[in-house]
Amino acid sequence: MRSVLNPAHLRAAMPTDVAVRTPVEQSLQQLETASVQRQQALAQSQQQDMDNRVRENMSMRMT
């Protein structure tokens, strides 16, 4: 959870010569791919949290 609160993990690093040679379209595609992956990871984490809460509630009702 700490990495979500720390914006430093969002920074990208790339050698300048690579950045200059990389077409803008390719950079934008990589950015989009990273964004989708981050959104999927967040959704999965939220689903796991929800599943854990449901399990906890069910176990509390059974006791």
Image: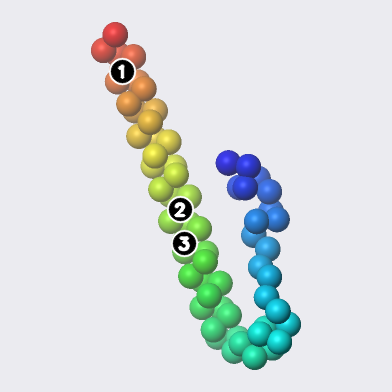
Q: Which residue is mark 1?
A: 59
In the rendered image, which quarter is residue 47 located in?
Answer: top left
| Residue position marked by numbered label 3 in the rendering | 37
Residue 30 versus residue 35 in the image, above or below: below
Q: Position of residue 53 (x, y in %)?
A: 39, 28
Which amino acid does the dot numbered 2 rest on?
Ala
Question: Residue 4, how many percent across, how many down?
Answer: 61, 47
Residue sitting at 52 percent across and 64 percent down? 35
x and y percentages locating residue 8 in the rendered image = 70, 55
Residue at 48% of width from left, 70% of height from top?
33
Give the CA separation, mark 2 to mark 1. 27 Å
Helix, strand or loop at label 1? It is: helix
| Of pointers 1 and 3, the one earlier in the residue sequence | 3
Within 10 Å of the Cα at label 3, are there few (<14), some (14-19), or many (20+) other Cα atoms? few
Asked if disc 2 and disc 3 are in contact, CB closer than 8 Å, the reply is yes
Labelled pair 2, 1 in contact (Cβ < 8 Å): no
Q: How many marks?
A: 3
Q: Secondary structure at mark 3?
A: helix
Residue placed at 43% from the left, 36% from the top?
49
Q: Residues within 10 Å of mark 1 (few under 14, many from 20)?
A: few
Quarter of the picture holding the N terminus: top right
Q: Regarding mark 2 in the picture, which secondary structure is present there?
A: helix
Report which residue position mark 2 lands on: 41
Marking on residue 7: none
Amino acid at dot 1: Ser
